[in-house]
Amino acid sequence: MTSATPSAPVLEARGLTKTYGALRALDAIDLAIGAGESVAIMGASGSGKTTLLHCLAAVLAPDAGSVRLTVPGRAPIELAGLDETARSAVRRTHLGFVFQEHLLLPELTAAENAALPLIIQGASRADAEAHARGWLQALGLAGMEDRRIGELSGGQAQRVAIARAQVTGSPVVFADEPTGALDSATSAEVLSALLHATVGQGRTLVVVTHDADVAARCDRVVRMSDGRLTGGQAATTSRARGAEEAR
């Protein structure tokens, strides 16, 4: 099925197929995601939602079909035909990632962790950390920039991961169960920070979640079962929520 979006697609999958032996993890999926939209992907374990996210995010190459990424200032990029080196370059340059296990480096400070993507792109350490500190402060971590990850709470560490996903100005951010390891109150706070940092700034957010409360705060929910999209609907909160999160 094809899911309509209210704006020009920043990501568009056509006939997306991925198999693992006899298992058809993705079965000819069509999906378009608009620029500045927040989309939640839901489904039971094994439904294919994480495989879909990984194909959209240039982590995995599909067996068949196409994934087109359209970012400002350059021609559309066909992700499905890229080798791993080229996909890695796209991830570094155009995409941000937030995971359930934040995957931060414990030996580094919050500022150093958040600055890493810029340093990898060639920015000086001083410039990268200055920019990272600005993001950390915007996400409510002022005064914690020099703490190591073990000195932070789970919610604070996830905010560092959100800052890391945003320092390069990535137009699209992917989040895989970003609140799954958090209690309900901390989950709500981290989700607000994530929405503020993405759709609140005009960026696109694609999130895999089991949490109906997380999905309800996204613009749209798409549901998966056995490698297929079984339904897409507008969430109870409209795009106006994204603007509200920016205030």
Image (cartoon, helix red, strand yellow):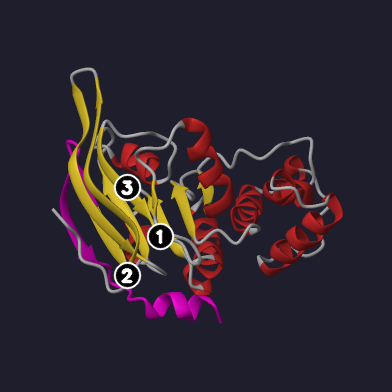
Q: Give the range drawn in magenta.
A: 223-247
- Measured Cα–Cα span from mark 3 to mark 1: 10 Å
Of the residues shown, which amino acid type is indicated by label 1?
A: Thr
**Element on which disc 3 rests:** strand
Q: Which of 143 and 169 is in front in this view?
A: 169
Q: Which of 107 and 75 is in front in this view?
A: 75
Q: Kindly check if marks 1 and 2 are in contact, taking CB atoms under 8 A apart as contact.
A: yes
Q: Is residue 216 left or right of residue 230?
A: right
Residue highlighted by disc 3: 67
Answer above or below: position of 166 versus 45: below
- Image coordinates of residue 160 in percent, x first then y, are 66, 53
- Measured Cα–Cα span from mark 1 to mark 2: 9 Å
Of the residues shown, which amino acid type is indicated by label 2?
A: Ala
Which residue occupies the extreme front position in the image? 75
Q: Residue at x 39, y 40 (%)?
A: 54
Q: Is residue 189 left or right of residue 35?
A: right
Q: Which residue is drawn at 53% across and 54% down?
A: 94
Residue highlighted by disc 1: 70
Residue highlighted by disc 2: 8
- Image coordinates of residue 119 in percent, x first then y, are 75, 47
